[in-house]
Image (cartoon, helix red, strand yellow):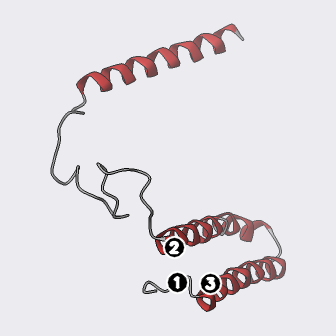
Amino acid sequence: MKSLFLIAIIIMIINFALIIMLNLISKKTFMDREKSSPFECGFDPKSSARLPFSLQFFLIAVIFLIFDVEITLLFPMIILMKISNFLYFFITFMFFLMILLLGIYHEWNQGALNWSI
């Protein structure tokens, strides 16, 4: 038990030393024209943070996050396919995909996927 605690302390000391070394040798003060320009969301990083933003951008971002999380739930199904009955796997997989397709169809009908308002 003591050796496990000692190993954990040594690992934390090494990590702390690496973090300090990297912070000392990093170039944080290097300013570039591209670094200080607005990025993909269109916000100017030097302006006020309280300016209104496009609701369409927010909706697209939320829809992307929802479907991205649901797609990541498909990856464990590959492992599940090897250890389960194929018929049960197929029914579950098709049910999950049907939910995804119905969700995207609903978003399409609501007009949330249209870029021009």
Q: Which mark is residue 113?
A: 1
User: Which image quarter holds the N terminus?
Assistant: top right
In the picture of the structure, the residue carrying the numbered disc 3 is 107
**Amino acid beneath label 1:** Leu
Q: Nearer the viewer, residue 42 or 21?
A: 42
- Image point (27%, 21%), residue name: 24
**Amino acid beneath label 3:** Glu
- Image point (31%, 26%), residue name: 22
**Amino acid beneath label 2:** Ile
- Image point (21%, 32%), residue name: 27
In the picture of the structure, the residue carrying the numbered disc 2 is 60
Task: Say which element carries label 3.
Answer: helix
Task: Say which element carries label 2.
Answer: helix
Give the mark nearer the N terminus: 1 vs 3.
3
Tell me the CA gap for discs 1 and 3: 7 Å
Residue located farthest toward the bottom when viewing the structure as drawn: 109
- Image point (70%, 86%), residue name: 102
- Residue neighbourhood size for the residue with mark 3, other residues' Cα within 10 Å, grouped as few (<14), some (14–19), many (≥20): some
The vertical placement of 16 against 90, above or below, is above
CB atoms of marks 1 and 2 within 8 Å? yes
CB atoms of marks 1 and 3 within 8 Å? yes
Give the mark nearer the N terminus: 2 vs 3.
2
Residue 77 figure quarter: bottom right
